[in-house]
Image (cartoon, rainbow, N blue to C red):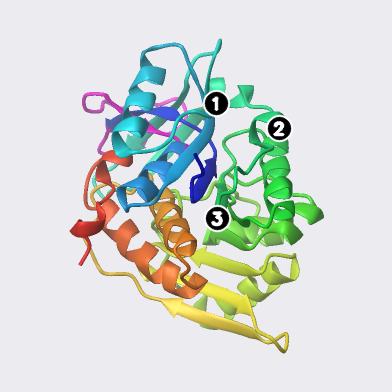
Amino acid sequence: MTEAVLVVGSANADLVVATDRRPAGGETVLGGDTQILPGGKGANTAVAAARLGADVALIGAVGDDAHGRLLLDSLRGSGVGTDRVRVVDRPTGAAYITVTPDGENSILVSPGANHALAPADAADPAGAKVLVASLEVPLDVVEHAIACAARAGVRTVLNLSPTAKLSEETLRHLDVLVVNEHEAAWLLGTDGDGSGGSDGSGGSDGSGGHDSHNSDAASLLDLGPDAVVITRGPEGALVATRGEQADIDHVEVSSPQVTAVDTTGAGDAFTGALVTWLASGATVADAARRAVDVAAVSVTKRGAQPSYPLLDELS
């Protein structure tokens, strides 16, 4: 079976605890009951796309344990193809997440089975229209997948989260690079903090101004990708593409204003929606407009995958 969207990425169990505030170093803070939810950047992206109607499959790995079964059930229940999800002799990846009352989160990821993926697992793009990858799996797997997809004429999208040093060749093979403001600054060497904030979904006050964002987008294009999308949380997103005369076209995409309950996985919702509409033939700017709406809906509910809307839930 050929899927329109092929996702290369992680599958994690999210262990989520609500807390009034995050603990400082050496401090103990009481939180609420632990929720165990399906997550991981790859699985989240795949589920977000599938819930919007995309024909999608995941290349990933889980352990032969309860968390692995939780993830496979969630993927299959959302319509994601799992034939290329390996079950390996390592514990399923886990993300330890604290969520504060303003909806912001802090995340520590234990990769586990995700690091059992090998480049050969992602060598065949299987005739997909779009391949999308993120970086909670080994870097060599992602770079090999992008190279193979580019050679096969498959459109390539990379969500640079968490940040990692990419080869020049990989950057040149990208059709679309998706970053949040922290990740953009890290890649350009203008900010030493590559933590990525709240999964690309919140926290920007826009204080850098349009000129600064446009300059960053232009610098990212100079690294090689055909298009760049900088997500800006409640401020929306900036799309930059290079025109026929080497001019750069910038498009500001505004976000609906919502009350955030939990921003976990909102960046993955954005990416899943983006590739869904790219696979249907939309321009990057038009796909980003739809993706911003999907991400905004996702932050109004708790959890990552459980918060992702169906197509008919969008206005």
Q: Nearer the viewer, residue 257 or 159?
A: 159
Tell me how far mark 2 sits from mark 3, CA to CA.
Answer: 20 Å
With respect to residue 248, does 32 lie above or below? above
Instruction: Indicate the position of residue 278 as horizontal and vertical percent values.
Output: 48, 63
Q: What secondary structure is the stretch in magenta mostly built from?
A: loop
- Tell me the mark number nearer the camera, choosing from 3 and 1: 3
Is residue 211 rendered magenta in the image? no
Question: Is tag 2's residue or tag 3's residue first in the polypeptide sequence?
Answer: 2
Residue located at (26% from left, 45% from top): 307
Tell me how far mark 3 sits from mark 1, CA to CA.
Answer: 28 Å
Instruction: Indicate the position of residue 30 as horizontal and vertical percent values.
Output: 26, 25
Q: Which residue carries the number 2 mark? A: 119
Residue located at (46% from left, 31% from top): 11
With respect to residue 300, does 34 lie above or below? above
Q: Residues within 10 Å of mark 2 (few under 14, many from 20)?
A: some
Q: Nearer the viewer, residue 165 or 128?
A: 128
Q: Magenta part of the protein: which range? A: 18-42
Residue 207 visible in the current orientation:
no
